Amino acid sequence: MTQIYHKTLTTRHFDLDWNRHVTSRTYEKFAYDARCEVLRELGFPMERMLNEGISLSPNQSYVRFLNQQFTNSDITVETQVFQMSNSSLFWKQTLFGQDGKKACEMESISTLIQKEKIVPLTSLPNLQEMNLHQLTIRPMPVHQNKIEHDYYIPYSEMNCFWILPADAIWKIFEEGRFLFFKEIVDFQLIKETDSTTFFMGGEIKIYHQPNPGSNVKLYSWIESFEKIRFYFRQDIIDANGTLIASMKDEQLFVSLFNSRPKRAPAAFFEKIERFIE
């Protein structure tokens, strides 16, 4: 049995998104803060890491959002960490609201890097004790009808390790969703049909660290579509045509008025049908 670490953080007004509840990136930031606290407990405080040139590089994430949170909510992050066979770190985290209910479940993989070599933490239990979520992201079909957008990665998104943290990469994909729906669906349709979508969870795979200050392309399409939900796919491609990150997320149709699930409006399906695999 691995040790379980706890840390409590509080949401603020600036954590709300356009759907008026705590944004997904807030959960990742809280989880990241908890990971850094665990590393400190394990002998790797931030000061040591910076002095010795050790960075914490994100590799992938799997997240499920279970209970909406609002401002001034105390969120307790429960963290377990395991060492993988390649010496990367597997983090299993659950975020609880102040009512004790699960707000978010997250699995992520990151790596301690020093001079391009992985720093192992041999004191940790082996990952074989856990069931790691297997990502379902698959390559984009060759002739897939998709939307392409140019995106500039700001230097200001760098963290103290001079790389993009996971939440900054989540932000790129979040922007991609907005760009897709603005171009294809039209935000006005949200009010006309009393329909919006909630980000219920997803998978992110980082193949190569995105370079701050670089220009990339975002490819967006729909993997599958159901009555009340659809699965949205995005790829980030660098200037050399290299795939650097992919995301698959689940979007649930809900009423803008009462936030309850509802069937997708016919007008929405008509607009996005040609982008479904």
Image: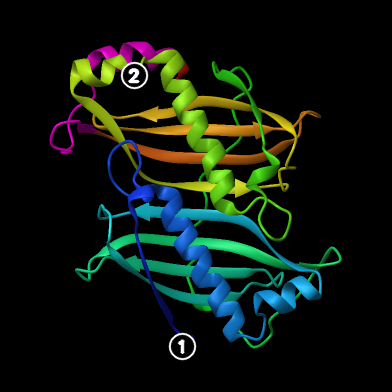
> Image quarter for residue 103?
bottom left
What residue is shown at x 18% (from left), y 23% (from top)?
Answer: 194
Residue 16 appears left or right of 51:
left
Callout 1 crowding tier (Cα within 10 Å): few <14, some 14–19, many ≥20: few
Q: How many marks on residues?
A: 2
Rendered location of residue 34, percent (x, y): 49, 71
What residue is shown at x 59% (from left), y 29% (from top)?
Answer: 140
Specify which label sits upstream in the sequence, 1 or 2. Answer: 1
Part of the protein shown in magenta: 254-274
Q: Amino acid at mark 1?
A: Met
Q: Amino acid at mark 2?
A: Phe
Rendered location of residue 197, percent (x, y): 30, 33
Can you identify the residue that label 2 sits on?
187
Can you identify the residue that label 1 sits on?
1
Q: Is residue 128 at least partly visible in the picture?
A: no
Give the vertical position of 163 relative to 246 (above or below). Answer: below
What residue is shown at x 18% (from left), y 37% (from top)?
Answer: 261
Most foreground residue, 133 or 28: 28
For this orientation, the residue located farthest to the front is 13
Residue 155 appears left or right of 230:
right
Say if the magenta span includes residue 263.
yes
Callout 2 crowding tier (Cα within 10 Å): few <14, some 14–19, many ≥20: few
